[in-house]
Image (spheres, helix red, strand yellow):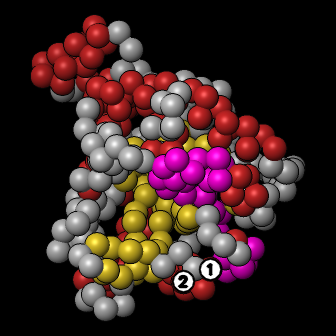
């Protein structure tokens, strides 16, 4: 991106804050699936939890201008359907004119700062259902880590349930990212076994007063057939941060995309900070996986 675009962004931020609401109101929107069977959404909500690393670069995401440059490249590629991000990033991209005809999913609970003693107390510190509706976004995403030995989990479950209900009340997607988790040596570790994923899915898909608008966002683990048999909800695959094992990750995504109920990919760091730093090539490779996936719901009317 040219430097003058970033200069204008900073000027708009300082001098014309009202432009954010104006641009949100005028943004061209689209149906969620828009005639497609599967979606590719770019995720950029990690910095809000203090998670700035990607691959072997512990501070990869520290430059906002570099991150925005990568996001603009990714969002402009054919086959990219949308963005998942916190308000600061969504608003930067609105001001840069990058979100017309894209799905925009607002990230909601970023209070569980990475590495903190309160990481499982994952409070809703970003978007609310009301602000997502007011900004004309297409849904809200929430992280729901279930740690049986940490009492903060029950509050997170309650807040996620309330968010699911509120989003459904606005006829908006509620995207839940579940994990069965625990503290290990001061860090949060997820149990990525199929049994643990089935258990986490079983808990979160029952949150809220209705599941009519609920989608899942889950990692690709061993025995994905067993995992996907645990739900009827539309499911997106979490890309994660494969580091140098990108080829293995892409192959695993490709296999999982063929399973019934899988509706696409939500990928952030793996595409924005790929080995070799060719964002466009990484995004195109991910998009090609969706093109290879079979259309399982042809003739769908909604």
Name the residue rendered at 31%, 80% in the picture: 184
Up-down relation of residue 146 to residue 10 (above or below): below
Residue 30 lies within the magenta run? no
Q: Which residue is mark 1?
A: 194
Residue 279, horizontal then vertical, whole percent: 52, 30
Magenta residues span 225-250
Residue 297, horizontal then vertical, whole percent: 83, 55
* Label 1 crowd (10 A; few <14 / some 14-19 / many >=20): some
Between 293 and 161, the one lying in front of the other is 293
Residue 237, horizontal then vertical, whole percent: 60, 58
Left or right, 104 with reference to 85: right
Residue 247 lies within the magenta run? yes
| Quadrant housing residue 146 | bottom left
| Tag 2–tag 1 contact (CB < 8 Å) | yes
Name the residue rendered at 62%, 69% in the picture: 221
Up-down relation of residue 38 to residue 237 (above or below): above
Judged from the image, the secondary structure of the residue bearing numbered disc 2 is helix
């Amino acid at each position: 991106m040219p430097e003058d675009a970033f200069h204008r962004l900073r000027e708009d931020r300082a001098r014309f804050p009202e432009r954010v609401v104006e641009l949100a109101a005028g943004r061209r929107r689209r149906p969620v699936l828009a005639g497609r069977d599967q979606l590719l959404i770019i995720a950029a909500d990690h910095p809000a939890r203090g998670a700035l690393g990607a691959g072997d670069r512990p501070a990869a995401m520290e430059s906002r201008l570099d991150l925005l440059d990568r996001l603009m490249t990714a969002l402009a590629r054919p086959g990219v359907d949308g963005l998942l991000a916190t308000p600061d990033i969504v608003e930067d991209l609105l001001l840069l004119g990058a979100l017309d005809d894209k799905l925009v999913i607002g990230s909601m609970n970023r209070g569980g700062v990475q590495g903190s003693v309160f990481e499982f107390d994952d409070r809703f510190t970003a978007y609310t259902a009301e602000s997502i509706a007011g900004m004309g976004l297409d849904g809200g995403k929430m992280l729901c880590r279930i740690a049986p030995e940490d009492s903060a989990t029950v509050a997170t479950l309650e807040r996620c349930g309330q968010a699911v209900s509120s989003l459904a009340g606005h006829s908006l997607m509620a995207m839940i990212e579940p994990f069965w988790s625990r503290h290990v040596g001061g860090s949060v570790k997820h149990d990525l076994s199929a049994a643990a994923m089935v258990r986490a899915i079983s808990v979160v898909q029952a949150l809220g007063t209705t599941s009519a608008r609920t989608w899942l966002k889950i990692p690709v683990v061993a025995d994905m057939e067993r995992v996907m048999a645990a739900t009827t909800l539309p499911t997106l695959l979490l890309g994660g941060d494969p580091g140098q094992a990108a080829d293995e990750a892409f192959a695993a995504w490709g296999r999982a995309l063929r399973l019934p109920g899988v509706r696409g990919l939500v990928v952030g760091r793996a595409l924005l900070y790929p080995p070799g730093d060719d964002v466009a090539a990484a995004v195109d490779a991910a998009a090609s996986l969706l093109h290879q996936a079979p259309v399982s719901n042809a003739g769908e009317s909604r």
